[in-house]
Image: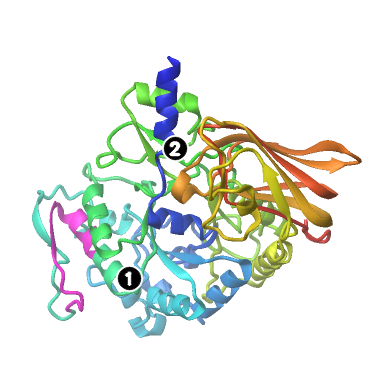
């Protein structure tokens, strides 16, 4: 490929930036997944849609407890499985009998999502919903609408229900079949009756299919954009992608600018599991084949327990050290960390889970409460006027240092106020304005007049946190070894994680 063509691809890649809702989602950093439903009472990971709703009967559900523990862990959003693959709905839906309205819990008057919505508002947390496109109840029930091969026609969303009118009087019209109408009726309920929803999560799993059922994703997205414009659509959607595994594994280089194989408004958003998704070589290959570039950040998800749903107290619970390791690799590796915490049959987070989450939150708070680089002076390569090196430590997330054009490499020297001892190094990139540029960097510390390399890593993205052996120094150096365009950084920090917190 010619040098000019290569330059065009680089300029195109750094012109792709997150929109406001993607940026707000990235800034959440650490979020809570909650798998809860009939599977909690059957000790199964996937239900079959044949469950009797009466089995759902948590004895003392407390969504305030969920929020308190999530907040103590440092989480900023709770994402609830309001309908898993079994089709059981955790809210007072108008459109199916497979729901909490037909359970024994609170004499059929309970609403898990309503409780959680109120608790999130009380505790200052954002709220998300997981709505499974697959629905085994609608597949297995004699009157189920999944795969019934009904004809597509223009239909009103929501379908009116005479004894339960909507406060929101908006109506939308889409060309859909019976199941897509059903699904969008439920989406309308979720997005209009439970306060602001900030994330909608569509799983791609299909435990069983029937009748060649297709999903009209573009209609779903259109409805969401009208009713919840600040919400990101995740996984089978255009805003947030799955990291590619359920074990909390992360990539050494996580690029948010990703090549996709078709137009954004018709792309089907498949799982992306390759180790390399955004290198220049990948960009060249996909663009040569007629693809497009898209800002598509990754979410790293796993469960604190062995399994997504609570089964019993024999389940393995990840340790504080295991969760912190994933946190550093995910939050500190340009992804958001979505950690599942399944409530037990009482409707509570179990004590072992709580102990780990509180320990994780305490460690993060102790470590990152004080930036030891505060008050440092910074000097470095030529920079744009208004983008001086001092911006790197001014604690203003809206300001940044930026090298002048034609500089793909740069050096910055940080003089600390005095000798500091640290074992964590943090760098942030101003992705909202300047995309993702740096592809290779190193950090050094001066010791006895010599520079000793502490870190050598690849891309930074929203945030890169590096764990290093405990180091004491007064002078540090950042070397940008390669950047797609003139590099920019918005924040630099050094921190000390206490020895008793690994």
Q: Is residue 174 magenta?
A: yes
Mark 2–mark 1 Cα distance, whole angstroms, equals: 47 Å
Badge 2: residue crowd in 10 Å (few <14, some 14–19, many ≥20):
some
Query: Relative to 227, is 19 above or below?
Result: above
Of 306 and 48, which appears nearest the observer? 306
Image quadrant holding the N terminus, namely: top left
Residue 61 in view in this figure:
no
Q: Horizontal and vertical percent for residue 94?
A: 23, 72
Q: Earlier in the sequence, mark 2 or mark 1?
A: 2
Q: Look at mark 1 in the image and give the residue it sits on.
A: 99
State which region is magenta.
165-185
Q: Look at mark 2 in the image and give the residue it sits on.
A: 14
Q: Which quadrant of the figure has residue 408?
A: top right
Q: Horizontal and vertical percent for residue 353?
A: 64, 67
Of 87 and 388, which appears nearest the observer? 388
Identify the residue at image location x=45%, y=50%.
432
Disc number placed over residue 261 in the picture, else none: none
């Amino acid at each position: 490929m010619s040098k000019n063509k290569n330059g065009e691809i680089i300029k195109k890649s750094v012109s792709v930036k997150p929109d406001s809702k993607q940026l707000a989602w990235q800034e959440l950093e650490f979020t809570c997944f909650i798998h809860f439903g009939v599977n909690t009472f059957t000790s199964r990971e996937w239900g079959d849609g044949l469950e009797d709703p009466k089995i759902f009967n948590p004895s003392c559900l407390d969504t305030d407890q969920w929020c308190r523990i999530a907040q103590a862990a440092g989480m900023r959003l709770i994402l609830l499985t309001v309908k898993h693959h079994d089709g059981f709905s955790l809210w007072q839906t108008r459109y199916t009998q497979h729901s909490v309205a037909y359970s024994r819990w609170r004499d059929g008057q309970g609403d898990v999502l309503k409780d959680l919505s109120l608790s999130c508002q009380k505790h200052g947390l954002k709220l998300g919903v997981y709505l499974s496109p697959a629905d085994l109840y609608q597949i297995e029930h004699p009157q189920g609408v999944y795969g019934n091969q009904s004809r597509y026609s223009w239909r009103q969303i929501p379908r009116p229900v005479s004894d339960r009118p909507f406060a929101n009087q908006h109506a939308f019209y889409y060309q859909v079949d019976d199941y897509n109408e059903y699904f969008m009726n439920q989406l309308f309920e979720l997005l209009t009756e439970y306060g602001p929803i900030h994330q909608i999560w569509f799983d791609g799993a299909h435990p069983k299919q029937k009748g060649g059922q297709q999903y009209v994703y573009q209609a779903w997205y259109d409805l969401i954009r009208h009713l919840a414009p600040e919400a990101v659509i995740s996984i089978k959607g255009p805003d947030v992608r799955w990291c590619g595994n359920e074990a909390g594994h992360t990539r050494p280089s996580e690029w948010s600018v990703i090549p996709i194989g078709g137009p954004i408004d018709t792309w089907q958003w498949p799982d992306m599991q390759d180790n390399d998704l955004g290198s220049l070589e990948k960009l060249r290959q996909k663009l040569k084949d007629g693809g497009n570039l898209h800002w598509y950040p990754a979410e790293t998800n796993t469960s604190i327990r062995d399994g997504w749903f609570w089964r019993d107290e024999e389940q393995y619970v990840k340790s504080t050290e295991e969760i912190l390791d994933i946190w550093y690799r995910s939050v500190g590796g340009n992804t958001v960390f979505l950690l599942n915490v399944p409530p037990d049959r009482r409707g509570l987070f179990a004590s072992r889970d709580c102990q780990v989450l509180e320990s994780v939150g305490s460690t993060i708070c102790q470590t990152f409460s004080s930036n030891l680089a505060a008050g440092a002076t910074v000097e470095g390569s030529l920079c744009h006027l208004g983008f001086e090196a001092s911006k790197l430590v001014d604690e203003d997330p809206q300001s940044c240092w930026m090298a002048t054009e034609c500089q793909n490499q740069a050096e910055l020297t940080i003089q600390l106020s005095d000798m500091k001892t640290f074992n964590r190094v943090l760098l942030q990139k101003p992705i909202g304005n300047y995309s993702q540029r740096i592809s290779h960097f190193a950090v050094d510390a001066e010791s006895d007049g010599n520079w000793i390399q502490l870190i050598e890593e690849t891309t930074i993205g929203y945030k890169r946190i590096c764990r290093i052996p405990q180091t004491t120094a007064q002078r540090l150096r950042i070397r940008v070894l390669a950047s797609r365009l003139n590099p920019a950084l918005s924040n630099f920090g050094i921190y000390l994680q206490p020895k008793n917190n690994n």
